[in-house]
Image: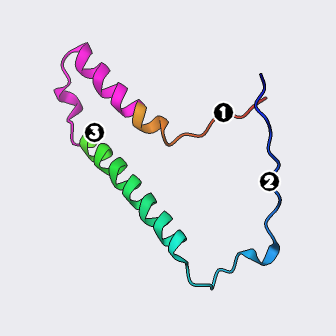
């Protein structure tokens, strides 16, 4: 069963004002994004702190690559449909 496509109307041209003060919803969204980024920074710092020369077994390297790939995958986009 194909997903139902919901049409979203275009935003009015005057809806965005770059000089308008941000409301509490936008400020809350920015805070949420910051908290999500902090989690990724912690994960990235943990991976970068590992000396790859210390990875001696295939299991060590496999675990490292698995964690790194999982972190990088979250930053990648979806492949373009052909």
Give the magenta part as a residue range.
49-69
Q: Which dot, 1 or 2, sits closer to the camera?
A: 2
- Return the residue nearer the eye: 3 or 33: 3
Q: SS at mark 2?
A: loop
Q: SS at mark 1?
A: loop
- Where 53 falls versus 38 (above or below)? above
- Return the residue nearer the eye: 20 or 48: 20
Q: Mark 1 or mark 2, which has the lower sequence index? A: 2
The label number, if any, that marks residue 47 in the structure image: 3
- Where 55 falls versus 68 (above or below)? above
> Which image quarter: residue 3?
top right
- Where 75 falls versus 82 (above or below)? below
Q: Mark 3 or mark 2, which has the lower sequence index? A: 2
Name the residue located 55 percent from the left edge and 78 percent from the top edge: 22
Residue 26 is left or right of residue 15, and the answer is left
Residue 53 is left or right of residue 69, and the answer is left
Q: How far apart are marks 3 and 2 (CA)?
A: 40 Å
> Which image quarter: residue 9?
bottom right
Residue 6 is left or right of residue 64, and the answer is right
Q: How crowded is mark 2: few (under 14 residues within 10 Å), some or many (20 or more)?
A: few
- Where 48 falls versus 12 (above or below)? above
Tell me the residue that label 2 is attached to: 8
The x and y percentages for residue 56 are 18, 19
The label number, if any, that marks residue 79 in the structure image: 1
Q: How far apart are marks 1 and 3 (CA)?
A: 26 Å
């Amino acid at each position: 069963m194909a997903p139902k496509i919901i049409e979203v109307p275009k935003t009015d041209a005057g809806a965005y004002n770059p000089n308008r003060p941000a409301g509490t919803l936008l400020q809350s969204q920015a805070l949420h994004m910051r908290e999500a980024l902090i989690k990724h920074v912690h994960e990235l710092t943990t991976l970068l702190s590992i000396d790859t020369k210390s990875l001696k077994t295939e299991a060590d390297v496999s675990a490292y690559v698995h964690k790194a790939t999982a972190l990088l995958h979250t930053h990648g986009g979806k492949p373009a449909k052909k």
